[in-house]
Image (cartoon, rainbow, N blue to C red):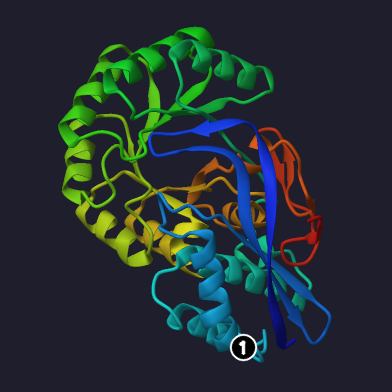
């Protein structure tokens, strides 16, 4: 199964409502799709969102990295020599993790097709169904309460609340949501780097004093401030999840060695795909740290790859893969099945993606 060609396409999928965080506001998913064609007729699918505010990768950068570097490096190689292809992929250009992720996902899709097995079974096969949270965008407290109640009525038991815009109002937001949904629902909060270390400790301690029962706080401080992240981790009881601070296995190792966070969030667009994500899983297992698998605003191809990873590995205990359910439509046939909070995988080879309607 040799690589004959790599084609780049685009999809545009409107969101049900605008997605608002401390970093950005998005109204539609505008993603790059990668199709890898082989001499056997098999096609592998991958996907990458241009998330410049987080990864630094724009639409043009993703296309350029694939066309000018990656395509030239791996065309003609045989999927049977998988490790060699992955080495070429990761060595042909530095950074550009989203472009690498899209190609890495398509290669793993073909790897599963080669051995006629669902990818999650080849990667570990721990389970075939997972439960995701759903994200509540940062807005005025009243609107966030309405969005939270709507999510609960759809069957969600875990809400991921976006904060980090105004720490004083953030406390009001969480208090209002907790009062509205009660204590049978888990609340996770994501500051998206929006707080200073002392500010984070102050607001999180108030949440503890108010008995708001926060399951975890995600990336409370800026990504590069590992000392600040550790300061928060050491001074609050709420578990701290490192997200933007962890791109590579090397980043994860620094966090784990310094105990700067209690949990690691793995996103394929940060790691450059499944290959490095699996390395982070192994490191987390060694250090006895649990992982979450998350996504950017992505459609179903790349999120399906993340679902396969989450289903494969027992070290992944938390799931934040709500991207496709936030979309107004689904142009992708096959792949993971999203039934609100419940996500399951078919037994189709590879990712199980059948076709994409552009």
Q: Is residue 257 above or below residue 238?
A: below
Looking at the image, residue 262 sits to the left or right of residue 338; the answer is left
Q: Residues within 10 Å of mark 1 (few under 14, many from 20)?
A: few
Q: Is residue 167 above or below residue 130?
A: above
Q: Nearer the viewer, residue 212 or 166?
A: 166
Asked whether the viewer can see residue 343, the reply is yes
Q: Is residue 140 above or below residue 102?
A: above
Q: Is residue 144 above or below residue 164?
A: above
Residue displayed at 40% across by 49% down: 53
Where disc 1 sits, the SS reads loop
Q: Nearer the viewer, residue 74 or 285?
A: 74
Q: Residue furthest front?
A: 60
Looking at the image, residue 76 sits to the left or right of residue 63; the answer is right
Asked whether the viewer can see residue 126, the reply is no
* Residue at numbered disc 1: 81
Residue displayed at 57% across by 87% down: 72
Q: Which of the 4 image quadrants contains residue 250?
A: bottom left
Q: Residue furthest bottom?
A: 76
Looking at the image, residue 95 sits to the left or right of residue 254; the answer is right
Q: Give the image location of residue 129, x and y in percent.
A: 68, 45
Q: Which of the 4 image quadrants contains residue 170?
A: top left
Task: State which quarter of the image contains the C terminus.
Answer: bottom right
Q: Nearer the viewer, residue 356 or 261?
A: 356
């Amino acid at each position: 199964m040799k690589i004959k060609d790599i084609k780049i396409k685009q999809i545009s999928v409107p969101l049900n409502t605008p997605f608002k965080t401390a970093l950005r506001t998005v109204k539609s998913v505008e993603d790059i799709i990668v199709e890898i064609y082989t001499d056997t007729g098999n096609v592998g699918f991958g996907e990458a969102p241009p998330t410049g505010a987080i990864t630094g990768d724009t639409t043009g950068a993703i296309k350029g990295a694939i066309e000018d570097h990656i395509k030239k490096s791996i065309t003609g190689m045989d999927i049977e020599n998988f490790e060699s292809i992955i080495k070429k992929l990761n060595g042909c250009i530095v950074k550009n993790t989203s472009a690498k992720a899209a190609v890495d996902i398509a290669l793993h899709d073909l790897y599963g097709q080669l051995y006629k097995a669902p990818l999650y079974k080849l990667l570990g096969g721990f389970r075939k169904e997972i439960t995701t949270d759903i994200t509540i965008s940062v807005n005025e407290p009243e609107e966030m309460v309405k969005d939270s109640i709507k999510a609960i009525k759809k069957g969600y038991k875990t809400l991921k609340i976006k904060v980090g815009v105004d720490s004083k109002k953030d406390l009001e937001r969480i208090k209002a949501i907790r009062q509205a949904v009660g204590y049978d629902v888990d609340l996770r909060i994501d500051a998206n780097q929006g707080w200073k270390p002392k500010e984070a400790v102050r607001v999180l301690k108030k949440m503890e004093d108010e008995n708001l029962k926060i399951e975890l706080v995600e990336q409370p401080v800026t990504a590069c401030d590992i000392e600040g992240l550790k300061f928060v981790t050491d001074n609050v009881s709420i578990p701290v999840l490192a997200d933007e601070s962890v791109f590579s296995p090397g980043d994860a190792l620094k966090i784990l060695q310094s105990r700067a966070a209690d949990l690691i969030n793995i996103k394929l667009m940060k790691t450059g795909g499944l290959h490095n994500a699996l390395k982070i899983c192994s490191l987390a297992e060694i250090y006895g740290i649990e992982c979450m698998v998350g996504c950017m605003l992505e459609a179903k191809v790349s999120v399906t790859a993340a679902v396969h990873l989450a289903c494969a590995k027992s070290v992944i205990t938390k799931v934040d893969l709500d991207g496709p359910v936030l979309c107004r439509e689904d142009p992708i046939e096959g792949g993971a099945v999203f039934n609100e909070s419940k996500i399951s995988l078919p037994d189709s080879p590879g990712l199980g993606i059948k076709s994409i309607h552009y």
